[in-house]
């Protein structure tokens, strides 16, 4: 059990760390110190080297240059096991829980509490409960990992490291997949762990999270650590300036549809999966509708049901005023002019193919003509800000931001009447976010009906003309944003409390 | 997060990459050199022709197996279908009196086996190894039932066309060799130049992405099994024609050999990534090795052991390369 450690003590020190992949330095000359009792945030755009630095600190990667000291002792790196023994634990973006075990069992995975050679469930339960009480965290310990929310899985994984006596916790994008209220719970827990003397390193794209949580902030850009300062020396503009240099990052103005624009698609009483319980939605041509809700509110399910990626249990649809059943397959919705940009880039792109092959997948002519295909792809990719020199690169080797651009171009390139976009900006850098959001507005200006589902309320507010708030599979509220833009605080103050939705 | 894997400029294919992609060709060249040293007549037209004749049937099955594996599947029933092909072709030739009709029906039987595999795997969701293990047993059983555990000897005077399939030569090479060569060329063209080929790669590379893109994933998967069933039946027909006898106890090693050829060539066992030229190289590597073993007087049983080890090495290399490139 970790007792309160003396604070301010240097827990992990990387000096002039550099890492090369092939001939390319992903990180060079980075010096950073994680101290006990402090949260140190690493920020930067995709490809800036944050994950590389985190990998070096956590022992997953061996630095090609520089040194790494853990609690005053030099460590070779490249061995997660050695780092683990030295008290460093990394929680990756892809969670490493065993889905069929309960949260309690997952907490003790690999270091079971035993009595006489048998796993002592009662002792584990007691120890876990004590830990949860101490950290003021509530977890459904008896439920299986596969059945609980992403937030609970995330917290379980962090607590597992704590139970294994890790003094240093490294978290890669811990809140990327969490909705606002869930983040708050996570932050409370991290707060408590900090006060107990843990050194915490965190990679995050969310600047509000960084500014609200961290004691120290290091900014990386293009493989260099450009600044490492205490939180008090930073504000939002200075962070952004250091991350992106001089590029502007605010999305351009939203698209305002003509008042008389016809309704492109309307659905009524859509029920699907476990979450969706009778939702109405209507989108006009040239309009961007924002769909916001917590994880589990049904926002992805709604989009998937409209696009035929998931069978609806009930509901009806009017397409350009014509009643028709909800599509039963992606092929059917595609023919009707509805396209879905799915939530997960990993699930929606073929990693071993280049952008052009991914773009054309599902609608190539029988005989491939690579040249003709590339000519078709080029304008679409450049419209989404995809760099021309990456065209031949396999999609699996692109950064998250570039993958998202390929994904958007792929479905926008089918010139749908209705474009449904699920979480277009998760885990991508600020500049790419701006480009992606701008291009959605651009598509709407061209007459496409766009629906954007996101857990990032701020982004939705920046581009949508209407906001639909989902909670527990129903429409909880609707806001018209075309007349007067609103802030996050206003929406939250408008009688909508998201806490009730945390499972 | 993939940012560590993203170079800032267009990556030049490094020496390591070229080695990874084409190293297998170097292995083949080295083996040919060894074979030529051990056996100076190795590269003589007669010997090369022999190698082709010996490998025509298995080569054809391997081409189809490449499609199955790239689509993310696996087919261990090809050996049984091969045996069924041999018995049916011979038996039906005797029963119907028409080699052409017998051949057509046999091919249809191959299609039926492949379609069954495909439906089990793609629509019902049975694991490919388990599904094809099941059909394998059933099909082999049917072949034994049909032949009453005996063999069909086809009289070459009564049915001259039966043996002509394997013994007719065009430009010095027998028909089965031509069928295999056409199979390789057509397979390569289909895989790299057609939308169907790319769809097969997409289904194996990321089935969900393929499905979300509007591809009919189950049909594409099924089509590869149908191809394998047909190829195996045709290969079995060639075997029966060669011997003038159709019996169910042939084809024991066909599944292992075909998979070995595909994997040794460097097509990923995980699906999505592979090529027909790799299968050609894999076929030649194993053929040359067999040749070397014979010139060194290595006993048949030890050859089997060696072949197994080579497959394990190939699969290990595949796993290592792929985990490193992540």
Image (cartoon, coloured by chain):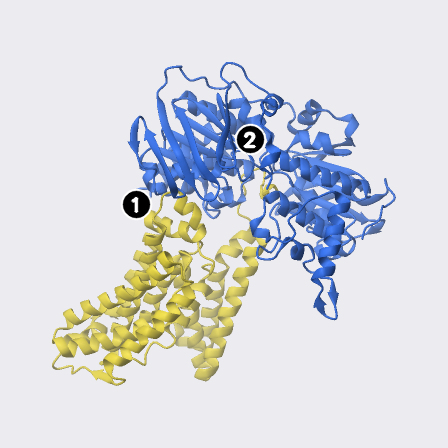
Q: Is residue B249 above or below residue B215?
A: below
Q: Which residue is mark 2?
A: A432
Percent x, y of residue B134: 37, 70
Percent x, y of residue A349: 46, 43
Q: Is residue A280 visible?
A: yes
- Name the residue at 15% across, 79% down: B94
Percent x, y of residue A47: 61, 38
Please, what secondary structure does the residue beneath circle 1 have? loop
Q: Mark 2: few, some, or many residues within 10 Å (few <14, many ≥20)?
A: many
Query: What colour denotes chain B?
Result: yellow
Chain label for disc 1: A
Report the number of discs: 2
Q: Nearer the viewer, residue A120 or B249?
A: A120
Q: What is the quadrant of the C terminus of chain A in the image?
A: top right
Image quadrant of residue A268? top left
Disc 2 or disc 1, which is closer to the eye?
2
Q: Mark 1: few, some, or many residues within 10 Å (few <14, many ≥20)?
A: some
Q: Nearer the viewer, residue B78 or A491?
A: A491
Q: Is A271 left or right of B165, judged from the image as shown?
A: right
Q: Is residue A67 above or below residue A268?
A: below
Query: What letter labels the chain drawn in blue?
Result: A
Q: Is residue A476 above or below residue B68?
A: above
Image quadrant of residue B11? top right
Q: Which residue is mark 1?
A: A367
- Name the residue at 57% across, 28% down: A457
Percent x, y of residue A55: 68, 47
Q: Is residue A64 visible?
A: no
């Amino acid at each position: 059990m970790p007792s309160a450690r003396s604070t301010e003590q240097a827990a992990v020190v990387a000096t002039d760390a550099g890492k090369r992949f092939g001939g390319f330095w992903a990180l060079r000359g980075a010096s950073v110190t994680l101290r006990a009792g402090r949260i140190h945030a690493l920020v930067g755009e995709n490809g800036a080297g944050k994950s590389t630095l985190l990998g070096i600190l956590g022992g997953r990667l061996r630095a090609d240059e520089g040194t790494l000291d853990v609690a005053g002792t030099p460590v070779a790196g490249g061995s997660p096991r050695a780092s683990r023994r030295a008290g460093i634990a990394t929680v990756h973006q892809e969670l490493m829980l065993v889905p069929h075990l309960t949260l309690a069992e997952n907490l003790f995975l690999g270091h079971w509490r035993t009595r006489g050679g048998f796993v002592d469930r009662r002792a584990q339960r007691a120890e876990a409960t004590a830990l949860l009480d101490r950290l003021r965290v509530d977890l459904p310990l008896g439920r299986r990992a596969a059945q609980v929310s992403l937030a609970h899985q995330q917290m379980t994984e962090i607590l597992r490291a704590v139970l294994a006596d890790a003094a240093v916790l490294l978290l890669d994008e811990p809140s990327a997949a969490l909705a606002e209220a869930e983040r708050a719970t996570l932050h409370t827990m991290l707060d408590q762990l900090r006060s107990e003397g843990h050194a915490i390193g965190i990679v995050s794209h969310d600047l509000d999270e960084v500014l609200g949580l961290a004691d120290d902030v290091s900014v990386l850009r293009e493989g260099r650590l450009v600044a490492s300062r205490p939180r008090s020396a930073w504000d939002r503009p200075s962070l952004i300036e250091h991350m992106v240099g001089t590029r502007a990052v605010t999305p351009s103005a939203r698209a305002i549809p003509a008042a008389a624009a016809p309704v492109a698609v309307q659905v009524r009483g859509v029920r699907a999966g476990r979450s969706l319980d009778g939702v109405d939605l209507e989108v006009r041509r040239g309009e961007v509708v924002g769909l916001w809700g917590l994880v589990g509110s049904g926002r992805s399910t709604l989009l998937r049901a409209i696009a035929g990626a998931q069978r609806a249990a009930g509901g009806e649809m009017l397409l350009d005023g014509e009643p028709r059943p909800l599509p039963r397959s992606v092929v059917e919705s595609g023919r009707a002019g509805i396209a879905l940009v799915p939530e997960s880039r990993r699930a929606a792109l073929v990693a071993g193919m280049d952008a052009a092959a991914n773009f054309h997948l599902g609608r190539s002519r029988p005989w491939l003509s690579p040249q003709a295909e590339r000519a078709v792809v080029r304008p679409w990719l450049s419209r989404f800000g995809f760099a021309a020199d990456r065209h031949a690169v396999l999609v699996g080797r692109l950064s998250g931001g570039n993958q998202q651009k390929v994904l958007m171009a792929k479905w926008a390139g089918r010139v749908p009447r209705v474009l449904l976009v699920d979480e277009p900006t998760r885990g991508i850098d600020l500049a790419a976010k701006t480009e992606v959001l701008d291009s959605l507005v651009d598509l709407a200006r061209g007459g496409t009906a766009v629906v954007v589902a996101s857990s990032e309320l701020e982004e939705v507010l920046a581009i949508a003309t209407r906001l639909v708030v989902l909670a527990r599979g129903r429409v909880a509220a609707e806001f018209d944003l075309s007349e007067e833009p609103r802030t996050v605080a206003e929406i939250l103050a408008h009688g909508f409390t998201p806490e009730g939705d945390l499972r | 997060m993939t940012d560590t894997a993203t170079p800032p400029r267009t990556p030049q294919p490094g020496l390591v990459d070229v080695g990874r992609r084409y190293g297998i060709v170097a292995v083949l060249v080295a083996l040919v050199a060894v074979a030529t040293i051990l056996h100076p007549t190795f590269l003589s037209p007669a010997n090369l022709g022999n190698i082709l004749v010996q490998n025509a049937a298995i080569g054809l099955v391997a081409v189809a197996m490449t499609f199955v594996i790239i689509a993310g599947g696996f087919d261990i029933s090809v050996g049984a279908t091969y045996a069924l092909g041999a018995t049916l072709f011979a038996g039906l030739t005797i029963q119907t009196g028409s080699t052409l009709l017998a051949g057509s029906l046999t091919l249809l039987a191959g299609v039926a086996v492949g379609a069954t595999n495909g439906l089990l795997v793609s629509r019902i969701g049975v694991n490919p190894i388990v599904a094809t293990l099941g059909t394998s047993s059933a099909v082999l059983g049917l072949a034994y039932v049909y032949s009453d555990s005996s063999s069909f000897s086809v009289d070459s005077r009564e049915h001259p066309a039966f043996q002509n399939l394997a013994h007719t030569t065009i430009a010095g090479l027998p028909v089965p060799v031509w069928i295999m060569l056409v199979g390789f060329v057509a397979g390569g063209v289909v895989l790299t130049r057609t939308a169907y080929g790319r769809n097969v790669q997409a289904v194996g590379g990321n089935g969900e992405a393929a499905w979300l893109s509007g591809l009919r994933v189950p049909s594409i998967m099924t089509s590869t099994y149908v191809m394998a069933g047909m190829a195996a039946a045709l290969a079995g027909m060639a075997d029966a024609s060669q011997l003038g006898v159709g019996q169910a106890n042939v084809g024991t090693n066909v599944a292992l050999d075909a998979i070995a050829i595909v994997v040794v060539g460097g097509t990923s066992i995980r699906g999505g990534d592979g090529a027909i030229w790799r299968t050609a190289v894999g076929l030649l590597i194993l053929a040359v090795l067999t040749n070397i073993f014979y010139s060194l007087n290595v006993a048949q049983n030890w050859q089997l052991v060696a072949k197994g080890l080579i497959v394990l090495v190939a699969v290990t290399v595949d796993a290592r390369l792929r985990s490193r490139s992540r």
